[in-house]
Every structure is written in structure tokens, then in C-alpha cells.
Amino acid sequence: MTKTEFNTQVIEQTNELKVFAKRFTNDYDEVNDLLQDTMLKAVSYFRNFQEGSNLKAWLYTIMRNTFINNYRRTTKSRSFITTEEEISTSHLQYSSVRNGGEDKFVMEDIQKALGELDEGFYIPFTMLYEGYKYNEIAEHLNLPIGTVKTRIHIARKRLKGTLSTYKN
């Protein structure tokens, strides 16, 4: 089927698609927007349509999915945007920007705490943090796996103590 033939068949479905769109919303503008989005997607993705299958069902599926995606998008944006005159303190946490300078100080403290660890604790701990498994660390350092686990445990305890000011 050529693209022109396909487009003609899609246009012939306009009235039925409009009726179907009214099942989702009674707003005239939203019905037209949904119809237009559906037609645009159908024409754009006509290569995905398998000739011989049910065109009307394919168009209905596109319309339903378009409506659902738009609904999710607007619901999500409404949950972040408040239209109240007075913004409550609970809404301020969503609208405020986090201070990046604070993160810099935290990272400096973490680096300092890591630097204070003995090499025997630092290396296994950082290897675990980088994604190595206990047995890989033990093999790399030529240590028993129990020793590796103990050193990582001690490193965690020391870091936890050093960084206790950041505890919630």
C-alpha cells in the first residue's frame, strides 16, 4: 500500500475517531487535539502498520495510548506546579533549588575521611565501592575473603564515626 492510499484510508476514519475521542473527554478542543495527534502519529508511523490488519483498531490503539500518555504527563506536571496564592512550606521544598556549595563541603569531608584510612582498609573499601565483589577483592589483594570482609567492615565503621555529623 502506498503512503497516499494509507493517508486516504486514515482520513476516512476521521468521523469515527472523533466519536471515539469524545469517550475520553467532552472538551471540544481536547477532542480535536487528540484527533490531530492520533492522525499525525498514524501518518508518521504508517510503515509500522501491517497491511491486511484492522486499520480502525490500530488507530484506536494509537488514540488510547496518546490520551493515556498525555493524561499522565499533565497529572505529573500538576503535581509539581501549584496555583495557590500563598505557597505553603510543604510546597517550598519542591520549588527551591538545592545549594550546590553544600555538596562540595560534604565531598571534601568524605575525601578527607577516606584519606585518613590506612591503606589496608582504604583499598578493599574503595574496590567494593567501585563494584568489585568480595571474592574479586580477595583474589586481587591475595587475602582471605574473611579478612577482606573484616577490613571493609572496619573501614565503614571508621567512616561512619568520622562522618557522624552528617547523620540524619
Image: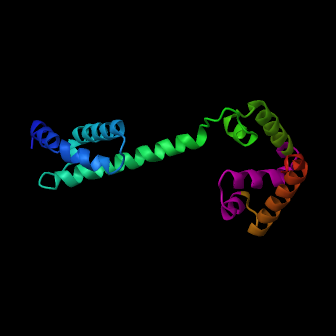
Viewer-proximal residue among 31 and 99: 31
* Residue range highlighted in magenta: 114-140
**Residue lying at 72% horizontally and 39% vertically, measured from the top left:** 93
Left or right of 155, for residue 86: left
Left or right of 102, for residue 12: left
Viewer-proximal residue among 109 and 155: 109
Q: Total label count?
A: 0
Left or right of 100, for residue 57: left
Left or right of 10, for residue 99: right
**Residue lying at 12% horizontally and 43% vertically, measured from the top left:** 9
Residue 167: percent from left, percent from top: 85, 50
Above or below, 33 against 24 in this view is above
Colouring chosen for the image of the structure: rainbow
* Residue 115 found in image quarter: top right
* Residue 2 found in image quarter: top left
* Residue 135 found in image quarter: bottom right
**Residue lying at 82% horizontally and 60% vertically, measured from the top left:** 151
Residue 27: percent from left, percent from top: 37, 41
Most common secondary structure along the magenta stretch:
helix
Viewer-proximal residue among 156 and 23: 23
Residue 126: percent from left, percent from top: 74, 50
Residue 122: percent from left, percent from top: 80, 50
